[in-house]
Amino acid sequence: MVRMPLIATVALGATVGATIRWAVLEASGAAAFPWPVLLVNIVGCTLLGLLIGLRVPRSTALLLGTGLCGGLTTFSTFTVEAAQMMRADDTALAITYVVCSVAGGLAAVVAGRTAGAMVGGPAC
C-alpha cells in the first residue's frame, strides 16, 4: 500500500521540477533547435545519476529523483519536438536532436553517477 507521506514527497518534488522546467522554457525564445528541453533533460539526467552514485536514502530518492527529476525532465516534449522536425522535413535536425538527447542523457547519468560514487562511495 502506498503511504500518503510518500505521495506528498513525490508530488512536492514533481511540483518544483515542473515549475523549473516551465520557467526555463518560458524564459527561452523560439529557436530552430530546442535547446531548453535538451538542457532540462541533461540536467535532470545528471542529477539522477548523482543521486544513484550517492546512494541516497529512499525518501531523498523519491523527492529528488522520482519527483524533481521526473517533473524537470520531459520525454514527451522531446518526442513531439523530434516528430515535428521530421514532419517539417528537417530530418537532419531531428536526428541531431535525438542523438544529442539520448547520448547526452546517457553521458550525463554516467557522469553524475561517477561523481556521486566518488563522494559517497561505490554506486549500486
Image (tube, rainbow, N blue to C red):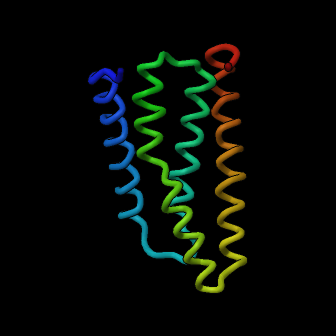
- Residue lying furthest bottom: 89
Circle count: 0
Point out the image quarter for the C terminus.
Answer: top right
Spot occupied by residue 112 in the image (x, y as percentages of width and height): 63, 33
Which residue shows up at 70% across the image and 28% down it?
Answer: 114
Q: Nearer the viewer, residue 113 or 62?
A: 62
Spot occupied by residue 89 in the image (x, y as percentages of width and height): 65, 86
Which quadrant would residue 60 be assigned to in this image?
top left
Q: Nearer the viewer, residue 28 or 60?
A: 60
Work out whether 62 lies above or below 101.
above
Spot occupied by residue 35 in the image (x, y as percentages of width and height): 55, 64
In the image, 82: left or right of 100? left
Work out whether 119 lies above or below 39.
above
Work out whether 58 lies above or below 101.
above
In the image, 121: left or right of 1? right
Which residue shows up at 55% across the image and 27% down it?
Answer: 51
Work out whether 18 lies above or below 8.
below
Which quadrant would residue 28 be assigned to in this image?
bottom left
Point out the image quarter for the N terminus.
Answer: top left
In the image, 47: left or right of 99? left
Q: Nearer the viewer, residue 120 or 14?
A: 14
Spot occupied by residue 70 in the image (x, y as percentages of width and height): 46, 42
Q: Nearer the viewer, residue 2 or 7?
A: 2
Which residue shows up at 59% across the image and 39% down it?
Answer: 46
